[in-house]
Amino acid sequence: MSEHLQSPAETSTLRPDPAELTTFYDESLVEDSPDPAPPARLRGALWGMFAALFRAIRFVYRLIGAVLVLAVVAAVPIVNFWVLGYLLDAQGRVARGRVAGGGGWRDAFPDIASLSRIASIGVGISLCLLPLRLLAGLAADARLISAGSTADVGLHRAVIVVAVLVAVHIYLALARGGGLSCFFRPLKNLRWLRKQIRNGQYLEVADRETRAFIASLRIRERWWLGLRGFLTGLAWLIVPTAMFAAANSSEGGLVAVTIAGGLLLIPVLSWMPLLQARFAAERRWRAAFELRTVRRIFRRAPIAGTLAVIGTLVLSLPLYLAKVVLPPRDAMWMVTIVFIVSIWPVKLLSGWAYQRGMKRETDAWWGLRWLGRGVMLPLLAVYVFLLLFTPSLGEHGKWVLFEHHGFLLPVPF
């Protein structure tokens, strides 16, 4: 037991000094080891993830609204030049390098916030009018079944009251900005109106905001840009297309004209994406006919130029199938949605190819240039050959050959 019963002095000599424990650790490892992430940092990361997700959802929502507005406007003759101008504006922004230069990919979708607000207004008004339509239908049935009855008179009076309330509600929702949520909060709209009456500055603010909203759409500028883009594209395409549409049968001398037109269409279609991208970037009439410059741009970025041409072919050819049976004029926007969704990426792709060619100062390796031509030209030949059969698919006959949706109006007529 003596070996277990030691004096306090002897026991203290066996215990190491706490200060000496630091000698068992490498101080550099202790200093370099990362500290555990504090809760505030974790909350910040989670909040950043939710904020990024919210921005992505908001962008998709705005993009869907913009597509709907463009589709509706594209179904209106003459006015649809504004849609082409909008697409050319987006193409020009990419071609000038604003996207690659730090402007963000939002520059490829200009003013989608304003366009989505128009879509929200349309959807909100339609939803607000839905109860009124149902009530008006009941009133019409009551009058048809028993004219002058209590139900007939009561329902027609209810229609008048509901129409006034719905009109006031729509007006207040528009006055608050026309957001989709404004059409579902009538009480908040009334409180907002009372606050604006007390401030006494509503008319001034509303006039300023309305002018800014209309100016953001650039109606005159984009319509004129679309008209010029249409005319310049038609100037390149009308002669070979007219030759291509000359033959009425497989016999006769016009077959040779059709073959010549098809052979002429192949190089023209290969030039058109970059030519239109140059016009959208420069916004000059002559820029659409500077073929030497465009060919030099293709030599500097042959892969990007080839992708632009292939993308145009892939996304344009199926559009002819959408015209087998056209809907009525008032439902044409349902078809133009497909055209907008297909043509918008083509414009951005060709603008990106143009921008890459403009950034480089020397030609690419000759092997890449010939590889691009070797892939692109056979596909163009197949595309032109398939165009021979499109007049038998659409309702417009041979006029369908002149539409060229990838370069002219994004509409099925």
Image (tube, helix red, strand yellow):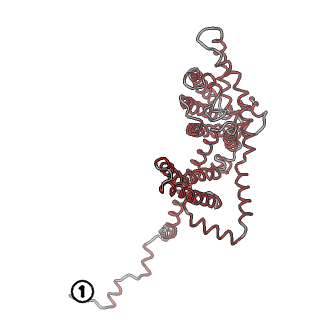
The crowding category of the residue bearing disc 1, from other C-alpha atoms within 10 Å (few below 14, some 14 to 19, many at least 20), is few
Q: Identify the image quadrant of the C terminus.
A: top right
Q: Position of residue 402 (x, y in %)?
A: 65, 26
**As displayed, is residue 412 above or below residue 158?**
above
Horizontal relation, residue 147 to residue 201: left or right: left
Tally the numbered discs: 1
Q: Quadrant of residue 385?
A: top right
Q: Which residue is mark 1?
A: 4
Residue 146 spot, x, y in % from top left: 47, 50
The reply, left or right, for residue 11 in relation to residue 269 is left
Between 63 and 308, the residue placed more toward the observer is 63
* Front one among 330 and 337: 330
In the rendered image, residue 102, in percent from the top left (x then y), is placed at 67, 51
Q: Residue at x 55, y 39 (%)?
A: 334
> Considering the image in quadrants, where does the N terminus appear?
bottom left
Residue 244's place in the image compared with 195, above or below, is above
- In the image, farthest residue toward the top: 252
- Provide residue 130's location: percent of width, then percent of height: 52, 52
Which one is in front, 370 or 152? 152
**What residue is at 74 percent from the left and 39 percent from the top?**
225
Q: Amino acid at mark 1?
A: His
Write down the quadrant of residue 169 in the picture. bottom right
Residue at the image position 63 percent from the left and 24 percent from the top:
401
Q: Residue extending furthest front?
A: 148
Q: In the rendered view, tell whether residue 285 sits above or below residue 16.
A: above
Tell which of 165 and 99 is nearer to you.
165
For the residue labelled by badge 1, is the local secondary structure a helix, a strand or a loop? Answer: loop
Instruction: Find residue 75 and report its image quarter.
Output: top right
Q: Does residue 232 appear left or right of residue 158 in this picture?
A: right
